[in-house]
């Protein structure tokens, strides 16, 4: 199962990099200015930055609490995006 949300923001690259750096001390991360990946125990997060959108994809492991996974991600992104929080996530 994979869930994707397009998050409207003009700061997608900055938030992607901040989130990856924030979690890099606990989890395996890979990132550059346009793409990022974080390997959580409950599954992977992939992000792609566009000019006006941050596309976030979660790939939960079997048995993962998907709602908690989405909330942890949203809460952390909102902290970095405090000037424009809460960000809008349209999960599909």
Image (spheres, rainbow, N blue to C red):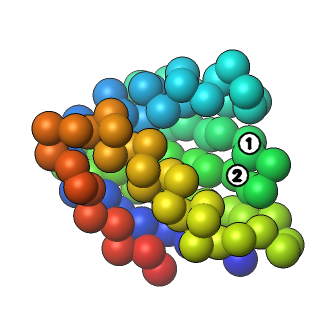
The CA span between labels 1 and 2 is 5 Å
Residue at 74% across / 31% down in the picture?
Answer: 27
Are the residues at dot 1 and dot 2 in contact (C-beta closer than 8 Å)?
A: yes
Going by the image, does 62 lie left or right of 40? right
Residue at 50% across / 52% down in the picture?
Answer: 73
Residue 45's spot in the image, x, y percent? 62, 50
Q: Residues within 10 Å of mark 2 (few under 14, many from 20)?
A: some
Q: Which mark is residue 39?
A: 1
Which quadrant would residue 77 be assigned to in this image? top left
Residue at 26% across / 39% down in the picture?
Answer: 81
Residue at image mark 2: 44
- Whether residue 30 is visible to the viewer of this picture, yes or no, is no
State the SS at label 1: strand
Q: Nearer the viewer, residue 37 or 70?
A: 70
From what the image shows, is residue 58 above or below residue 48? below
Residue 39's spot in the image, x, y percent? 74, 42
Going by the image, does 89 lie left or right of 67? left
From what the image shows, is residue 48 above or below residue 67? above
State the SS at label 2: strand
Which quadrant would residue 51 be assigned to in this image? top left
Q: Nearer the viewer, residue 75 or 39?
A: 75
- Whether residue 53 is visible to the viewer of this picture, yes or no, is yes
Q: Quadrant of the N terminus?
A: bottom right
Residue at 44% across / 43% down in the picture?
Answer: 76
């Amino acid at each position: 199962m994979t869930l994707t949300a397009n998050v409207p923001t003009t700061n997608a690259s900055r938030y992607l990099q901040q989130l990856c750096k924030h979690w890099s001390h606990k989890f395996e991360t890979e990132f550059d200015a346009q793409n990022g990946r974080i390997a959580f125990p409950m599954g992977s997060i992939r992000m792609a930055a566009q000019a006006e959108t941050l596309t976030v994809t979660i790939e939960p492991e079997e048995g993962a609490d998907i709602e908690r996974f989405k909330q942890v991600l949203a809460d952390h992104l909102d902290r970095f995006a405090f000037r424009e929080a809460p960000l809008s996530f349209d999960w599909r």
